[in-house]
Amino acid sequence: MRRHEVHCGFVPLTDAAVPIIAAEMGFAAQEGLDLILHRENAWAALRDKLAMGRLDAAHMLSPAPVAMSMGLGGLARPIDA
């Protein structure tokens, strides 16, 4: 099975455990994903990198994808939550 590379950003908080555990314990690899984690220090940096295409996925606060799709606080981008 060919593995697909996915760049996922996160802010180091306890609720970021899901992507971290998926990468570290091999759950992502079992699904054919090479999950590459990118630690960010601010929600704004995470939002901007996701909007500019430098990240494929991200751990975010729940209102952030809605705000991004509306163009609030930055570029308007369609986001799937």
Image (cartoon, rainbow, N blue to C red):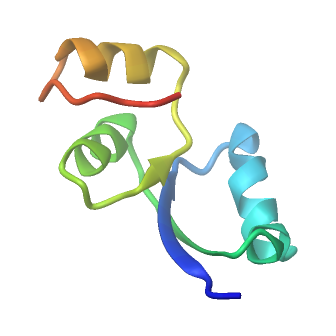
Residue 15 percent across, percent down from the top left: 73, 38
Q: Is residue 71 above or below residue 74?
A: above
Q: How many marks?
A: 0
Q: Residue at x 71, y 88 (%)?
A: 1
Q: Which quadrant of the view contains residue 19?
A: bottom right
Residue 78 percent across, percent down from the top left: 28, 28
Residue extending furthest toward the left: 75
Q: Is residue 40 left or right of residue 69?
A: right
Q: Residue at x 73, y 70 (%)?
A: 23
Q: Which quadrant of the view contains residue 77?
A: top left
Q: Is residue 21 left or right of residue 37?
A: right
Q: Is residue 66 above or below residue 35?
A: above
Q: Is residue 77 above or below residue 16?
A: above
Q: Residue at x 79, y 75 (%)?
A: 24
Q: Is residue 17 above or below residue 3?
A: above
Q: Is residue 74 left or right of residue 9?
A: left
Q: Residue at x 77, y 50 (%)?
A: 17
Residue 7 percent across, percent down from the top left: 46, 66
Q: Is residue 79 left or right of residue 15?
A: left
Residue 34 percent across, percent down from the top left: 61, 78
Residue extending furthest toward the bottom: 1
